Image (cartoon, helix red, strand yellow):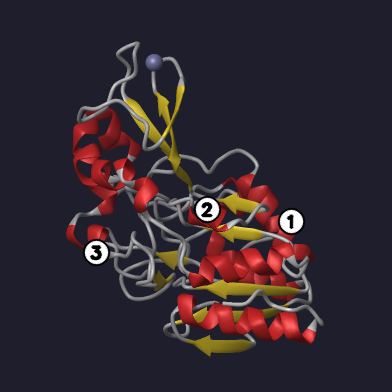
Amino acid sequence: MPPRRRYCTSRTNRPGRPAGAAGCGDGCRIDPGGRRGRDRRPPAARRPDRGGDLGRERDPDLPLAGGLWEKFDPAVYASIETFRRDPAKYWSLRGEFIRNLDAYRPNPGHLALAELEAAGLLRHLITQNIDGLHHKAGSRSVTELHGTLREIFCLACRRRYLAPRIPPGTPPRCDCGGVLKPNTVLFGEALPPGALERALREAASCGCLLVVGTSAQVQPAASLPAIAREHGAKVIEVNLERSAAAADLFLEGPAGAVLPRLAARVLALAGRNPAPR
Ligand SMILES: [Zn+2]
């Protein structure tokens, strides 16, 4: 089903404006190369308006907090076109983080979601994050819409490496000489096979959708709250400020502080004993 709200995105990582706002036409889309055009495909076939390898959007709790793409235009540095032309440019920005991936730990927000899943109270988790911290926290049923930095693969022979155990160099190269690329979604790339379909299915069949730490402006994930609501679900948002998710209930604050309290309350209501903290 078509999303009710569509956004035009600028090239400088600023929040998108509603389609139809001054300067863009209804359905206007600016792709990474700066070419304007209408995207008439159904939402499930669209590429994300903003590339996936963007790190976190709002919540400062996690190590991929926004700073990187505020300094460097992601449409330039995080596009597959640029990567193929000059992979060293991408690796010079992302390499250090990827090589230190083991050092980053999940925060109490990640752990709370994993705890809810373990108690049978959270069915599935859909994330735009690429840091793998939900898996690290113990979440099992996870759709990583924008892929993961954990997996690195060779563009020539497709051999897979697991970060941070990757060859040295900028860019790092496979034994065969091919350039290595993280298994994340860059501007100009499609989402991982099946990821969007799974996310749409889960949103359309859940009883409650929890929206956490997002601007709800990155398509296609931004459509999920509306899809859940259209199928009768309640939407709860945990965020520093209200987003475009139009939630039924808004809980203000960073995910790392709010989610543990929310999880404890839900576990208590369900008659489960939350693990001692
Ligand atoms: Zn190779």
106 or 191, nearer to the observer: 106
- Residue receiving disc 1: 201
Residue at image point 53% right, 43% down:
191
Give the Cα separation between the discs numbered 3 and 1: 33 Å
Residue placed furthest toward the right: 271
The mark nearer the N terminus, 3 or 1, is: 3
Q: What amino acid is found at the position of numbered circle 3 in the picture?
A: Gly
Camera-nearest label, 3 or 1: 3
State the residue position of label 2. Answer: 136
Residue at the spot 62% in from the left edge and 56% down from the top edge: 139
x, y percentage for residue 75? 28, 50
In the rendered view, would you say 102 is above or below 106? above
User: Of marks 1 and 2, which one's residue comes earlier in the chain?
Assistant: 2
Residues at discs 1 and 2 in contact (Cβ within 8 Å): no
Question: Which x, y percent locates residue 248?
Answer: 64, 87
Identified at 48% across, 55% down, the residue is 133
Q: Is 30 on the left-hand or right-hand side of 253?
A: left
Callout 1: SS = helix
Q: Which residue is mark 3?
A: 67
Q: Disc 2 or disc 3, which is closer to the eye?
A: 2
Q: Give the image quadrant in which the ligand numbered 1 is located.
A: top left
